């Protein structure tokens, strides 16, 4: 007997095999949905202590094979961290793998020394201790390795997890909020596997230019799982934890869902839609109603949206490469209990910086140097003509000031641009419309080829003239090969 479940798992090792077994009204995908373990630390009043360990191990992702992986407090991926606004967070990270690594708190406003970027590297067998106060609103943040030139590889192997922040205003809303029950983390990543079960990373120049895209989608480390909904209204905290792939998300039955949050927290108003583009490192919180008892499949529909590519035929398909429709996960609503939660129209009020407050504008020009460097593995990606140099400060920003940064994409590929230590608002895009989740606070924005995107932000009052924060493309292979710069706040 060869069960459907085994068949689907086994087929996952063939990267090119499309996951398209469609039987109306039946369960299509077979693996059990896994909720990452929640780790709220040890609390003493407003002080919360987290003990973390970067570790390696073997994970059962495929049927009969074990996959060597990395994780935080577990073998693959990280436990979900959780803290509240006003908490003083104390974190210890022990590095037990044989490579130097870091943990960066992506989306967090915090002192540069606590950022966990390339300047806070942790040698093998060493422990890094840091603390900071949570000064921002409820949000779905995440954390991941930020080791210089090694980020792509380490995140691909599993060094990534979710970091949820709470606050009183968000908690007062009648939103689904029972972790793992009706408030569910969904970390989406695409991978390739070798015959022996090991993860297959770069396959050549194409992968390193375009960023690594895999043919198998994992949710929380599981291939195409089924989430058996216990409640009829679900809140999904979507995180695109992929190295390079942008997902064009929609349900197979095109059902509507409700976008309530972006990178930096809740939106001001709920946005109804039936599709969502999620670039690497972006988060979106959505509400999905499954009171109809059906079993919708969340999919990546590559053909239904423009790929973000400009230019003609061959170039276009070459650069979007490996972009089939993909099944991501299925929700089984057949046993869902009627939820007593609502879909609120109004969520929170944002304290957004205004154009009158802007004291400085900066240009960030994203470029790819075509030519020999592509072959040699050198730094071919740059910002304002410069590839990343850890010994060079590129920008000096005043603490507490409001700035507009214009991110100009001078290349033929889309780049998700990320800035540390801030949450910005998008004020304008030259080539595309601002979409639902882009109405909220953001720390990463996808900039299409030849597009200009203006973002406005207020820099928090953390001063440190010696320790820089990063800004970079969040296609991790681009970040690792030069598309990153450094700023200090003084
Ligand atoms: Cu998600 Cu500089 O990082
Ligand atoms: Cu970051
Ligand atoms: Cu890029």
Image (cartoon, rainbow, N blue to C red):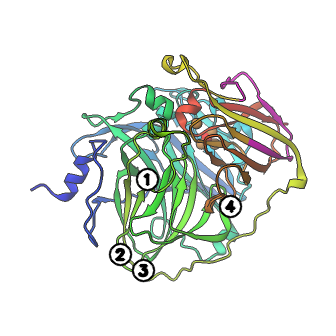
Task: Find out whether residue 395 is within the magenta segment.
Answer: yes
Q: Are marks 2 and 4 in contact (CB under 8 Å)?
A: no
Which residues are drawn in magenta?
384-406
Q: State whether residue 425 appears in this view.
A: no
Task: Tell me the element at label 1.
Answer: helix
State the mark number for residue 439.
4
Rendered view: 173 above or below 203:
below
To which residue does mark 1 refer? 303
Q: In the figure, residue 71 lies in which quadrant?
A: top left
Cα distance between the residues tagged 2 and 4: 30 Å
Cα distance between the residues tagged 1 and 4: 25 Å
In-image side of 478 versus 329 (left or right): right
State the mark number for residue 291.
3
Point out the frontmost of discs 4 and 3.
4
Task: Name the quadrant of the N terminus.
Answer: bottom left
Give the residue drawn at x 69%, y 57%: 441
Task: Find out whether residue 435 is within the magenta segment.
Answer: no
Q: Within 10 angstroms of label 1, few (less than 14), some, or many (20 or more) residues?
A: few
Please name the predominant secondary structure of the magenta segment in the image: loop
Q: Earlier in the sequence, mark 1 or mark 4?
A: 1
Cα distance between the residues tagged 1 and 3: 29 Å
State the mark number for residue 294.
2
Query: Residue 328 in the image: x percent, y percent?
Result: 39, 56
Task: Name the quadrant of the C terminus.
Answer: top right
Q: Earlier in the sequence, mark 1 or mark 2?
A: 2
């Amino acid at each position: 007997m060869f069960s459907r479940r085994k068949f689907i798992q086994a087929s996952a090792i063939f990267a090119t095999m499309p996951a398209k077994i469609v039987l109306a009204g039946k369960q299509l995908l077979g693996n059990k949905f896994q909720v990452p373990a929640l780790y709220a630390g040890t609390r003493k009043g407003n002080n919360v202590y987290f003990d973390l360990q970067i570790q390696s191990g073997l994970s059962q992702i495929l049927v009969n094979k074990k996959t060597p992986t990395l994780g935080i407090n577990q073998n693959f991926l990280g436990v979900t961290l959780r803290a509240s606004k006003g908490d003083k967070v104390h974190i210890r990270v022990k590095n037990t793998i044989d490579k130097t690594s870091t943990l960066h708190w992506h989306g967090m406003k915090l002192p540069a020394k606590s950022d966990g970027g390339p300047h806070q590297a942790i040698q093998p067998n060493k422990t890094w201790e840091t603390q900071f106060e949570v000064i921002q609103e409820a949000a779905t943040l995440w954390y991941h390795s930020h080791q210089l030139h090694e980020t792509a590889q380490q995140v691909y192997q599993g060094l990534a997890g979710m970091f949820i922040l709470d606050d009183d205003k968000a908690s007062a809303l009648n939103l689904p909020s029972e972790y793992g029950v009706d408030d569910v983390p969904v970390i989406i990543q695409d991978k390739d596997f070798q015959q022996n079960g090991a993860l297959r990373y770069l396959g050549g120049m194409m992968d390193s230019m375009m960023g690594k895209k895999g043919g198998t989608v994992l949710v929380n480390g599981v291939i195409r799982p089924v989430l058996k909904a216990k409640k009829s209204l679900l809140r999904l905290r979507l995180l695109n934890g992929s190295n390079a792939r942008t997902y064009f998300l929609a349900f197979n039955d095109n059902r509507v869902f409700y976008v309530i949050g972006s990178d930096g927290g809740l939106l001001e108003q709920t946005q109804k839609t039936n599709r969502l583009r999620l670039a690497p490192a972006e988060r979106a919180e959505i509400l999905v109603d499954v009171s109809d008892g059906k079993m919708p499949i969340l999919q990546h529909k590559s053909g239904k949206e423009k790929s973000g590519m400009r230019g003609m035929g061959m170039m276009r398909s070459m650069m979007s490469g490996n972009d089939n429709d993909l099944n991501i996960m299925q929700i089984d609503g057949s046993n869902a209990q009627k939820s007593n939660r609502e879909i609120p129209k109004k969520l929170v009020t944002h304290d957004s910086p205004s154009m009158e407050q802007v004291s400085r504008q900066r240009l960030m020009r994203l470029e790819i140097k075509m030519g020999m460097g592509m072959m040699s593995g050198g730094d071919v990606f740059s910002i304002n003509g410069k590839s990343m140099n850890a010994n060079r400060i590129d920008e000096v920003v005043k603490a507490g000031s409001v700035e507009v940064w214009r991110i100009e994409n001078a290349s033929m590929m889309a780049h998700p641009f990320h800035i540390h230590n801030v949450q910005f608002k998008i004020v304008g895009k030259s080539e595309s419309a601002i979409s639902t989740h882009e109405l909220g606070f953001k720390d990463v924005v996808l900039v299409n080829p030849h597009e200009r995107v203006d973002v406005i932000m207020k820099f928090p009052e953390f001063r440190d003239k010696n320790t820089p924060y990063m800004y970079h493309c969040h296609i991790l292979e681009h970040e690792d090969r030069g598309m990153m710069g450094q700023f200090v706040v003084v």
